[in-house]
Image (spheres, rainbow, N blue to C red):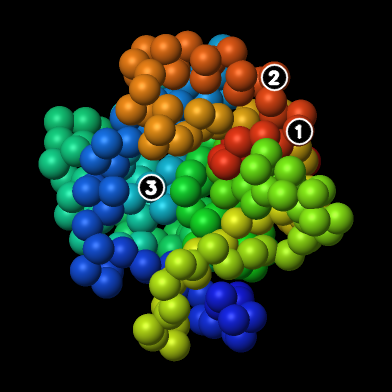
Amino acid sequence: MNGVTDDNTPSKKVANQYERGYDYTKYWDNRDYENAAEHIAIRRLLKGSHFRSAADIGGGFGRLCILLRTFADKVTLAEPAASQLEAAKEVLAGTDIAQVQMQADDLSFADGELDLVTMVRVMHHLPEPSAEFTEIARVLAPGGTAIIEVANYGHYKNRRRHKKEGKPLPIEPVSIRTVKADEPDAIAFVNHNIDTVVGQLAAAGLQLDSKLSVSNLRSQRLKKALPKSVMLAAERITQKRLAKNNFGPSIFLKLKKA
């Protein structure tokens, strides 16, 4: 369960990253477009479906759980950080959404207990996600659905840069840490090669059904220049069209358990 740091040395995978004094709720300040874009993607991928039991893995303070509840009879927020679960008490107050502390590579669900699993904005911190994928496959019932969001290294800007430099896109995770790690087990920040991830998922028994390119207009300049309604209208049009080329910074994969 080791990953890589920005200098390519081994690092301990830290699932419980938000116990280090970081208030993840503040991260979403001024990110209304990104939040709405992810809601659009999930609604599109789950349209027409309804599930018995679902879990949002590494779901933080429950940002997506209320949406998932419209698609499932039972929803569990499965989150490793006690501080995030504490914040979720307020966000999910008045709902029947369960809140349970657990890590993605050690899920406390029975084999085949769930028929929908989501894992969004977690892959960013998992240089080597095979253990997590194995657990997701284990807890999914046969024919169950998983939606996994992947931080995409091969987005349009990087593809263009690599092509200009005559270099192929790396197949391994790439650290995007901008500040040198100050702890031996510091949180990983990586972007992934989508094809590599799809292969890892297939090895765990999760077959790709469809994908969307999400947050395609993620840009501080655009957010200042354009109304959110215009950006979201463009987002709805482009998510499916741009998925083939893995255009955006965030790729949502819809998978089925074989």
Q: Disc 3 designates what residue?
A: 59
Q: Residue at x 37, y 13 (%)?
A: 229
Q: Which residue is drawn at 86% across and 55% down?
A: 166
The one of 51 and 199 positioned closer to us in this rendering: 199
Q: Which quadrant: the N terminus?
A: bottom right
Q: Position of residue 183 (x, y in %)?
A: 39, 85
Distance from the alpha carbon under mark 1 to that under mark 2: 9 Å
Distance from the alpha carbon under mark 1 to that under mark 3: 27 Å
Q: Residue at x 44, y 78 (%)?
A: 180
- Which-is-in-front pick, marks 3 and 2? 2
Q: Disc 1 designates what residue?
A: 245
Q: Which quadrant: the C terminus?
A: top right
Q: Please report contact status of discs 1 and 2: CB closer than 8 Å, yes or no.
A: no
Amino acid type at circle 1 is Asn
The one of 57 and 50 positioned closer to us in this rendering: 57
**In this figure, what is the number of numbered marks?**
3
Q: Disc 2 designates what residue?
A: 241
User: Badge 3: few (under 14), some or many (20 or more) residues near its Cα, within 10 Å?
Assistant: many
User: Badge 1: few (under 14), some or many (20 or more) residues near its Cα, within 10 Å?
Assistant: few
Left/right placement of residue 175 relative to residue 195 reads: left
Amino acid type at circle 3 is Gly
Left/right placement of residue 10 relative to residue 32 reads: right
